[in-house]
Structure formats: structure tokens, C-alpha cells
Image (cartoon, rainbow, N blue to C red):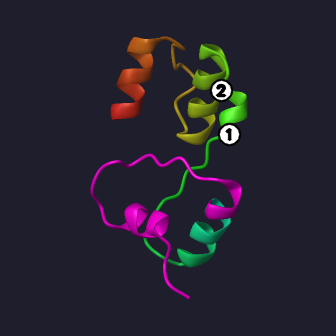
Amino acid sequence: MAIPRSVESVTDGSAPWVHHVTESQAEMIRATLTGADVLIIELDGSKMRTVDGLFSEYQRGFWFPEYFGRNWNAFDECIRD
């Protein structure tokens, strides 16, 4: 089976580093990259319909610290760390 373009773009190391994929694409990526030296962080877009929801999902997925300020400046600081 050929590696789908979405898997290649995840592993080639160039931007973008965040990818929007369907659930079936995510399943294929997880299966293809099992055991690879790649960190996959999955965010649920349905939980990010508000700014507060977006902050919550990124805090969960990227392990932002408990003191995360839940504002754009704090988000910028945490996402860069």
C-alpha cells in the first residue's frame, strides 16, 4: 500500500506542522507511523467552536501548564515552548 500524501507531509519535517485530517486519514496515519519517532497530537475540532474551547483543547493536547492564562498572549507563549 502506498503511503498517502497526508502521511508523507507529517513525516517530511517541513511546514506545516499542524494538519487537518479526517478520522479515516488519522487512523491511517496512526497505523502507518506506529513505532516511528513522530509525536502525534490529536485535537478535536468539534470542541474548538469557541475561543475557550480552543484553549481547552490545546491545553489538553499540548500539555500546557496548569497556570496557562487562557488568553492569546499566554497561548502564543505556550505554543512556542
- Identity of the residue furthest to the bottom in this view: 1
Q: Is residue 29 above or below residue 22?
A: below
Q: How many marks?
A: 2
At 70% from the left and 56% from the top, the residue drawn is: 23
Find the magenta span and give its range.
1-25
At 29% from the left and 50% from the top, the residue drawn is: 15
* Location of residue 10 (image quadrant): bottom left
Say what amino acid the circle numbered 1 marks: Asp
Observer-nearest residue: 16 or 43?
16
The stretch drawn in magenta includes residue 7: yes
What SS does tag 2 mark? loop
At 52% from the left and 20% from the top, the residue drawn is: 68
Q: Is residue 74 above or below residue 3?
A: above
The location of residue 22, given as percent across then percent down, is 65, 53
The disc label shown at residue 48, or none: 2
The stretch drawn in magenta includes residue 32: no
What SS does tag 1 mark? loop
Q: Is residue 5 left or right of residue 34?
A: left
Figure quadrant of the N terminus: bottom right
For the stretch drawn in magenta, the main secondary structure is loop
- Identity of the residue furthest to the left in this view: 14
At 38% from the left and 13% from the top, the residue drawn is: 73
Q: Is residue 73 left or right of residue 26?
A: left
The disc label shown at residue 44, or none: 1
* Location of residue 38 (image quadrant): bottom left
Say what amino acid the circle numbered 2 marks: Met
Observer-nearest residue: 45 or 75?
45
The location of residue 3, given as percent across then percent down, is 49, 79
Q: Is residue 19 above or below residue 60?
A: below
